[in-house]
Amino acid sequence: MTGAKGNRASLVLLVLIVVGIPSAVVGYQYGLRPALADHRIVDITARAPEIGGFSPDVVRAEVGETITLRFAADDVTHGIAIGPGLGIDSGHIDPGHVGEITITPDTPGIYTYYCNTWCSPDHWRMRGILEVVDPGAPGAVAEPSDPIIDALDAASIDIDTEPQTAEGIAPDRIRGRQSLAGVAVPPQLHDPEWRFSHSPAAGLAELQSANPDLGDGVLIDVVAYLWSETPPPAEIKELYAKNCAACHGERGAGDGPAATSTIEEPVAYPEAAWHRRGDIWYAKIRRGGMGTDMPNFGTIFTPEETRLLVEYLRYLSFSGR
Amino acid sequence: MKTLIDRPPTDDGRRDVLARMPRLRRIVLSRAFQPVSMLLLLAPFVLAVVAGLLGTPAGNRNFGIVFVWIVWWAVLMVLLVPGLGRIWCTVCPIPAPGEWIQRRGIMRGGAKLRTGRRWPRRLRNMWVQNAGFLTLALFSTVILTRPSVSAVVLIGLTGTAVAVSLLFEKRTFCRYVCPIGGFIGLYSMVAPIELRVRDPQVCVDHRSKDCITGNEYGYGCPWMVYPGKLDRNLDCGLCTECLRTCTMDNVVINLRRPGADLAKPAPGRRIDEAFKALIMLACSIIYPAVLFGPWATVKEWAAVESFGGWLIYAAAFLAATLVVVPGLFWLAVAWGHKGSGSDLPVRRAFNDYAHALIPLGLAAWIAFSVGFALTNGSYALGTISDPLGWGWDLVGTADVGWTPYLSGAAPTIQAAILLGGLIFGVRTALRIGLRHGPPGPAGLRAAAPVAAFLLAATLLLLWLYLG
């Protein structure tokens, strides 16, 4: 090859390398690959909230549109779930890996994609919004109201008031179940809705009125059983383990690995459960704790999941005591 | 192609490699050989930079980290330098843009840029390379793990090479500035490959000195070396231009005894070379201690997790590489030299004996690189399929998990390499001792403290690797 021809050929090769490689890389990622896909692909960078969280943190989709969300974990291991009510969980995504979630939402609404693997002290802030709109009824998607929280507001009940602690009370649901046959139980105590809106302490007062001859020890155990008689489903245990246990501990004792880094000491359920109403717990879970690190889970859990979670907290509170 | 002048083979144990491999000879003598090699390697280089700037910050999933600091580094230190000396400098893409701009051409230059200033005399040594290497070494934990920083370093090296090529003549960057070329040159003296003239007298008698001026077959030596006086690998970049330009066919690539450059008389040895050997040996001890050792705080300091911590690390690092290790070595040399009967100044002895550190230093780097490659090499499978950590799977290996190879055998392999380096180093020290002092036991006694220094360094390394 002559010098001039060789120079021209090598110059072409040089341009191909210096310009072609970056162009090919970027072009494939942002041009060809989305173009080849039969539906929309959204690349989302996932970092611990302290260094950026999700980017983008808002994704819009239409009802019936198939969309793939590709979460690239940039720093530490994350796990991506989308809620409420979608039951989507990517599992762990290690640094440098990409987890894909493909969905076709059929209901308009505001959904939340969030990290459900403890990734940093501010882990709970790692959230993004998936806004699903109905193309036939465009416009802002209204946040659904919550009748339980609305009722508490209407009754001017402050959900952030600290509950009275149950000193000297050590309820045991197993003993309560064994004692149940010998105790007269007012019918409202068998009503889940009544129990949900009343604390176990209130239930004890009802039992004391109906059983003046029985000692408080037996009645407390019976209340503990009644307030936790429904065994929690496995998925609620998992929900608790992934979202609550880091602060509140595996057994709800407020001793999770992240408990030392929260503004206030996380609630220990066995201590708080006796005087706490279920609906207040429900509201607190969904809305979050003002002035504390307790996040709002209303954008992640469905109301049904939240109620089951409240029952699980009762179960944790009264088990093995 | 120029005419091959038939000459008899040399008679000193050296074998002319290319004479035995005519196809390889044709390739090497082609003017396209070096530029095409550089262009081919420029492709992964550019990909490494792109991956570093745009790809995942997770180093173990980024081509820019895995293929530069695991694959390339291991290939360089385990295979290329010990086996083929400066062969990397032949094909390195970093100086290529600068050289091509300087020559105004890739395969064959047009009108050269009117630069050609000579590098300042005071800097015609390895001190700039030493300083550059130490600067990179101080941040190595960050460079080795953060793709964007690694990319900036690669861009910085290339930019510096372009700037130096625009301001100064030929491969001034490679010869006097490149922090990588410095230690490659040092350790290439161990390699069993050399570029030399077959008969120095032919060069003396040959007036046109095409190897310096260049001719229609190639450029004058870009490394500013006169092949006729070349007696060590240190300064020859194996660019092979002199093989092309020598009309007397007097330049050859020899297969030789490994380490042939180390113990022979070489009056040109300088203290900057000695410090290069000492810095490299010290770093070969510090790196495994910091990266693999149990001292988490030191690792955090090295990773610049706090500026104050890094300052402590930097001070300790520089003290170890520039004061403590050289100081101890000076004491060892001076102790042996005293009473040896040699009339050489201690400083000359220091410069000479420092060459006994080169085999051990290289062995330590090979041991380090072998361990590093065996432990982390499996990351290459993932990144070849997904070079930017964007979720691609080009060749179906993106999800191959991390698998350390030969983890049980690695310490034994490393120990064997280190012991080989120790034996090689001690042998070199003894040969230098015999050359310096009076023949016989006195010369060996002079080298004994240096041998003890080598033994101590080896024991320290063995402790780090074997625990």
Image: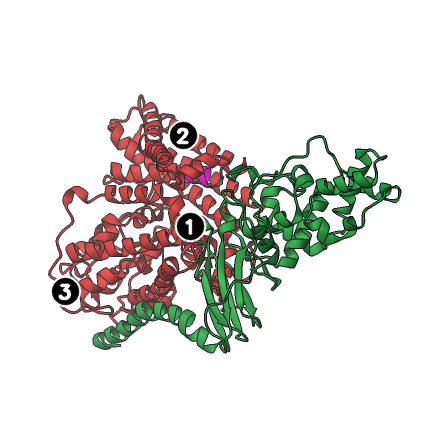
Left or right? Give the position of B139 relative to A234: left
Residue A119, percent from left and from top = 52, 49
Which color has been applied to chain A in this rendered view? green
Q: Which residue is mark 2?
A: B453
As drawn, which residue projects farthest toward the right? A182
Which mark is first along the chain, 3 or 2?
3
- Have a look at marks 3 and 1 and say if they share a chain: no
Please, what secondary structure does the residue beneath circle 1 have? helix
Q: Which quarter of the figure is the N terminus of chain B placed in?
A: bottom left
Out of B431 and A298, give the one closest to the viewer: A298
Chain that is red in the image: B
Residue A51, relative to residue B108: is it above or below? above
Of circles 2 and 3, which is in front? 3
Q: Are marks 2 and 1 on the same chain?
A: no
**Measuring 58% from the left and 39% from the top, which residue is drawn there?**
A162
Q: Which residue is mark 3?
A: B112
- State left or right for residue B393 relative to residue B308: right
Q: Label 2 vs label 3: CA separation?
A: 50 Å
